[in-house]
Amino acid sequence: MHGMFMPSGYDRAITVFSPEGRILQVEYATEMVNNSPTALGLVTKEGVVLAGLEKRLDALQDREFSQKLFVLDDHIGCVVAGFSSDARILVENARIEAQMNRLLYDEAIDIEFLIKRLSNIVQQYTQHAGVRPFGVSMIVGGVDQFAERLYQLDPSGVYGKFFATVVGIGKDEANAYFREAYRRDLTLKEGVAMAIEGLSKASKEKLEAERIRLATIPSQNPKLTNVSQEEIARFLDKVQQRGAG
C-alpha cells in the first residue's frame, strides 16, 4: 500500500474523484440534507403547495420566523432542507435574478430560467479547490406564464422537475405516500391536506402544528400566501384523527 492513496484521501478536496467516480464532499453535503428537517412541494390543478418542518423551537424563539420557507418573487417560493445559511445565499441570488428580469424585460421571471441560474451557482462549488459544496437542497415552485412548476435543486447542482417531491428526514416514507396518493387533478385545498399528510408520514415523532411552515401559490392571481398556524392546526388534527382511527 506504500505510495498509494488511501480511500480516506479522496474526501479531502472537492476537485478529486474517487476511483469509483464519486465526489465524496458532494455526497457528504447530500447526507447532511437527508438528516435535516423535511421539506416538500407538490403541484395541483389550482396552484403549487410548499411545506416544511422547522427545527424544534426554543420557548423564547419567535415562532413566526422561518428558516424553511422563502419568497423569491411574487409568483415563486422555495422551501429548503439543509444548512440554512447556505440557503440564504441562494435565496438572495434568486431574488436579485428575479428583480433584474423585471427591470430589464418588464415581466416576471420564468421559473425554469431561474432554477438554471441557481444550479449554475451550485455547480461551480463542486469543481473549484478551496471551496465546499452548498449543503442545502431547494424545492422551488410557482406559477409563471406557462404553467404551475416545481423543481428540486440538490448540492451537486443537478435539478429536476417534479409533480411532487420531498427532501430531508423521512423523504422515502413521504415519497412513497405521494406515489400512492398523488393525483394531478388535486384542488389547492386537497394539496394542502396532502402536504401535511406527507410531513406526518416523514416525521419520526408526533407532529406539532407550530413546527410546520406552509404556503400556496394559486394559478389564478399567482402570489405566494402563507397558510396560517390556525388553519395548519385544523388540517393536522384531521390527519392525526385519521391515523388514530
Image: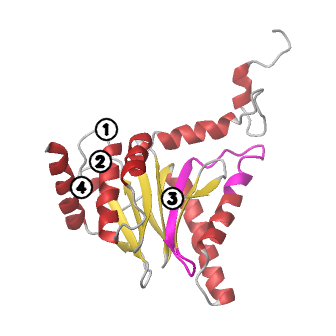
- What element does badge 3 sit on? strand
Residue 209's disc number? 4
Question: Mark 2 belongs to which amino acid?
Answer: Ser
Position of 30 with respect to 240 (left or right) is right
Residue 167: x and y in percent read 47, 48
> Of all residues shown, which one is farthest toward the top?
1
Check contact, mark 1 vs mark 4: CB within 8 A.
no
Position of 158 with respect to 206 (left or right) is right
Query: What residue sits right under mark 3 in the picture?
Result: 139
Residue 116: x and y in percent read 67, 64
Residue 3: x and y in percent read 86, 14
Residue 200's disc number? 2
Q: Which residues are magenta?
A: 121-147
Q: Nearer the viewer, residue 63 or 152?
A: 152
Residue 64's disc number? none
Colour scheme = secondary structure
Precedes in sequence: disc 1 or disc 4: 1
- What element does badge 1 sit on? loop
Check contact, mark 1 vs mark 3: CB within 8 A.
no
- What element does badge 2 sit on? helix
Precedes in sequence: disc 3 or disc 2: 3
Question: Which residue does the image show at 64% across and 87% down from the upper left?
Answer: 103
Precedes in sequence: disc 2 or disc 4: 2
Query: Looking at the figure, which quarter contains the C terminus?
Result: top left
> Local crowd at mark 2 within 10 Å, few (<14), some, or many (≥20)?
many
Question: Which residue does the image show at 71% across and 50% down from the upper left?
Answer: 125
**Quadrant of res 119:** bottom right
